[in-house]
Every structure is written in structure tokens, then in C-alpha cells.
Image: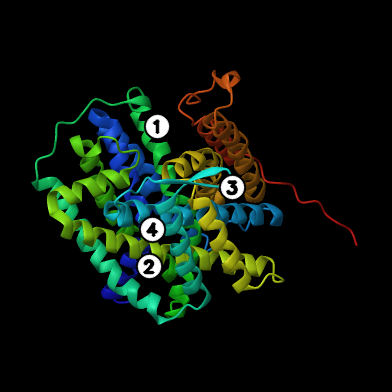
Amino acid sequence: MSVTDTLGLGFMTFAFFLGAGNLIFPPFAGMLAGENMSFAMFGFLITAVGMPLIGLIAVAKSNGKVMALLPGFAATALAIAIYIIIGPAFAAPRTALVAFEIGARPFIGNPDALMMLGGKEFNIAQLIYTLVFFSVVMFLSLYPGQLLDSVGKVLTPVLILLLVGLASSVIIIPGAEVSQPVGDYINSPLTKGIIEGYNTMDTLASLMFGMLIIDLLRKKGVNEAADQTKYLIRAAFIAAGGLAFVYISLFYLGASAGDFAIGADNGGQILTNYVTYHFGNLGSLLLSTVVTLACLTTAVGLVTACAEFFNELLPRLSYKLLVVLLSAVCATVANVGLAQLISVSIPVLMTIYPVAIALVLVTFLTERFARPEFSHRIVLTVALFFGIFDGLQTAGMDMSFLDFMPLHAEGMAWLLPTALTAIVCLFLPKKRLQKVQA
């Protein structure tokens, strides 16, 4: 591949990861972290940039077979969990909510008007918007054509230019004085930033995107495993550089937002207020258009990928039926609201993220394990076991009996046991081969 082809692959990988939802977390985290922003930002970059980068490299190193050493049922269960999380449960509905917050809310006269439906209150504007949004997603997913590809080719450069302009404005235009940190950002900004990075879901996505990129390389005629690894790693570093640039600038935007952040319960509102104030209605319109299209294409990609996966898993369910069902589920889930959806997703991510990180870790250690199959299984089991406790604690359950464990209070009780298990596995003796007489 030429340098141009490699750069194209890198920017495509960057576009894969930069769903518009990723724009809402750094500003909000930056606002809450205040003077402790540097520590929080470093922690965020570990899980939102570093781990996806390492995840792609792990996929490249294993030639797309990161789950090959797991039992069949375990590999299938993990894949199902990842597809559900990045699909109908959280990531896909979030695209509609981000599009509503940034792309529609600023232009609606009374965006918080409520209505009673089935004994429950719903935001009228949000309900109508999400129904229309996922109707379009369903249509495009049922009949995918050149339209989506054309929009993507135009959209990605425009989105990158917009982000570069936004980052430049954060540097050039003086911001408000950085405020005092609040909540967990006061005493443990680093670990809070690490956990906040879970929300991007990019480590989970990297396990799937890596295999997708390998397939794309094969279609380009790159068939040697060593060459696939080389180009995937280069693309991963280009994407990681782009993500880091975006996240750092948005962290600074949130930390210096001042009055723009008053009353905001998510980063989308901070971002919209900032752009509207400094760039007027034209800037707000441009931001809303690009983010809406980005959310739409991301949602179509997620629904399509999930429908194809579950169609292969359950051939009796047709692809078109799955698209309809997934779109309906996404529209339903989206109406819990953006802040509420994020709060619900955190316990689930606290449980599954340790497993994904452990999977990446053992992939790099596979050649050093005397018993790789056993090592993979035991390390991931330990990560899941303690990840469940972290998830339950985040959900509000009393896990005080684990207070003696390092990092338990910060929600990372899984880290030390998982690391120690991996180290022990490095020193396990090889399994003796027993002679079997015929």
C-alpha cells in the first residue's frame, strides 16, 4: 500500500471510532474535573485512546482471532455482549440522543415539553425525533446503497475540519477561569478519568473494528498476515493521534466553559452553547448538520453490523426482520434520555470493560504462556468476577465487604487480581503430555 492508501486507512479508522457520541464526554468531564483536569484527562486518554489503540494492535497480532483460545460458548457470549452494548442497548440509541441534543434542541422553541403516554411522561420533541431518526436508520439499513458511502466520504473531512476549527478556537479564544473540581474528581481524578473513558465504548469496538479492517485489507489484496499487521498498526496510530487531539481540546473547552456549562447535564449542551456563542447561528447550524449526519451514519453502521451478526448466529431470523426489530428497540431505549441512558450504561460497562481489557492483555502474552488456553480462560474469569462487583457497586449495591481491596472505592477492584493472575500464569509449567496407547 502507498503512503496515501495508509493515510486513508488511518483516517477511516479514526472515523470508525469518532462517533458523535464521543464528543459529549470530554467537555462534561473537563467541566467537572476543573483544576484537576490534567489528571482526569490523562486517565480518560488511557481508556479512550490507549486501550483502543492496543486493542487494534492485539487484533492485528492475533490475525483477527482474539477469542480463539476461549471456549466456544464463552467466545459467543462475549461477542453477543459486545454487539448488544455497542448496538441496541447503549451506543446506537445514544446516537439519536446526541443528534437531538446538538442537532435539534437548539432550534426547538420548547424542547422540554412533556406528554403522558401509557401512564409515563415522555419528552414530546425527543420522542418524535427519535422515531423519525430510527425510521430513517431502518430504511437505510434495509436498502443500503451508494448514498451512505457518498455521505460518509463528504462527512468525514467536514467533521475533521470542524473539529480542527473548534480546537483552534479553544486555544485562541480566552476561556473562563477553571473552576474547582467536584465529586470523585476531587480525590481521585485519574481513576475517575479512566472510568469515564469506558463511556466511549471504543475498547469494545476496537475488537470488532480490527477484524473489519483486516477484511478490508484482504479486499485490497493485502493477504500476508505480517503485512496486515503492519498496516493495521499504522492505521491504529493515526486514529489514536486524531482521537487524542479531539479529546484534549474538548477537555480544555469543558474546563474553561464557565457560563456555557451552567445547567448542563451532558457535554452536548456545553458544546452547543459554546459554538452558538462564539460562531453564531451559522456555526450552530453547521455543527448540528454535521453531528446529525455523523450520528445517522454511525447508527446505520451499528444496526447493520448487529443485524448481520445475529443473522449469522440465528439464520432463521432474516436480516430485514432483525433490522426492523433492532431499530424499534433502539427507538424505545433512546427515550429514557441521554443523561439517564449514560447512568444506566455505566454499571454494565464497569462489568464488561475489565474483560475486554484482560482479553487484550492476554493476547499480547499468549506466546509467553506455557499453557495459553488455560491462561486466557482463568484471567478473563477473574476479570469478569471482580468486574461484576464493580458493576454492582456502581449500580448502588453495598459492596463494602470488599473495602479492603486496592482501588475498590474507585471502581477498579478488578485490576490487581487480574494482573496478579496473569503474572502467575506466566510461571505455570507446561502441561505434561500423556502417551496414549492404541
Question: Do the numbered discs 1 and 4 sit on residues whose CB atoms are within 8 Å?
Answer: no
Q: Is residue 54 left or right of residue 87?
A: left
Callouts 4 and 3 close, C-beta under 8 Å: no
Task: Indicate how the structure is coloured in the image.
Answer: rainbow
User: Badge 4 is on which residue?
Assistant: 17
Q: Nearer the viewer, residue 31 or 171?
A: 31
Say what amino acid the circle numbered 3 marks: Gly
Of the numbered discs 4 and 2, the one sitting upstream in the chain is 4
For label 1, the residue is 191
Label located before the other in sequence (4 or 3)? 4
Is residue 391 at all visible to an observer of this figure? yes
Q: Residue at label 2? A: 231
Q: Which residue is mark 3?
A: 118
Camera-side mark, 4 or 2: 4
Relative to residue 208, is residue 428 depicted above or below? Answer: above
Of circles 3 and 2, the one toward us is 3
- Extreme-right residue of the structure: 438
